[in-house]
Amino acid sequence: MDRDELREKRERLLGFENSSSTSSNISDNISDSYQQTKFKRIKKFLKETNHQPIIFTTIIVQEQTIEYRNIFIDTLHDERYILKKAIPVGIEHAEQVYIATNYDLGLYGYGDTEGEAVDDLRKSIIECYEDLKEEKELALIPSKMMAYYKEIIEER
């Protein structure tokens, strides 16, 4: 499974619509509102647990079971970069797809196994960091992301 297929599967599982067309249908607006509320509940749950390791949590989303737990990674597995401190990663598993998420950076990794998902997340972190480094002027949000990167990443 390639990365786009895994992303689509995750979005389908969590109920995110990837539609470019706008709809004035009231039921669509209610559904979007429900999805936003559900996502806020998951983020609130993660904030309340302070990203502490959770042995096992099960979240039921639209009659589908998603296994969820938190881990910390302390390396990017890249000889060019060192993580100064461990960063939290949420691991979700549903329908044979693993999703590794770092909510602080808003990045995801996908894979057929937990290890593949975490490795894909590590690659995403490095790619985003390198892209931000190349920019001469950053807008507000990217500059905040870059500040966070400087807190957690040291170049060799």
Image: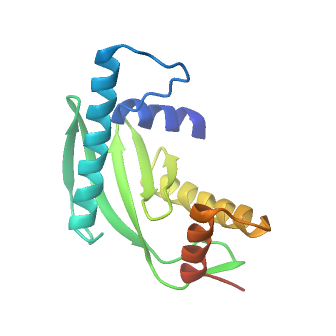
Where on the picture, by quarter, is residue 60?
top left
Residue 84 seen: yes
Residue in the picture at 40% in, 15% down: 24
User: In the rendering, at what x and y percent does residue 65 appear?
Assistant: 23, 37
Q: Nearer the viewer, residue 7 or 95?
A: 7
User: In the rendering, at what x and y percent does residue 76 appear?
Assistant: 58, 71
User: In the rendering, at what x and y percent does residue 146 appear?
Assistant: 62, 71
User: In the rendering, at what x and y percent does residue 59 appear?
Assistant: 21, 44
Residue in the picture at 80% in, 68% down: 136
Q: Nearer the viewer, residue 116 or 83?
A: 83
Quadrant of the snapshot with the N terminus? top right
* 44 relative to 12, above or below: below
Residue in the picture at 19% in, 48% down: 58
Q: Nearer the viewer, residue 116 or 89?
A: 89
| Numbered circles on residues, count | 0
Residue 2 seen: no
* 33 relative to 106, above or below: above
Left of 135 or right of it: where is 111?
left
Q: Nearer the viewer, residue 42 or 36?
A: 36
Where on the picture, by quarter, is residue 38?
top left
* 35 relative to 149, above or below: above
Quadrant of the snapshot with the C terminus? bottom right
Q: Residue furthest top?
A: 25
Left of 92 or right of it: where is 41?
left
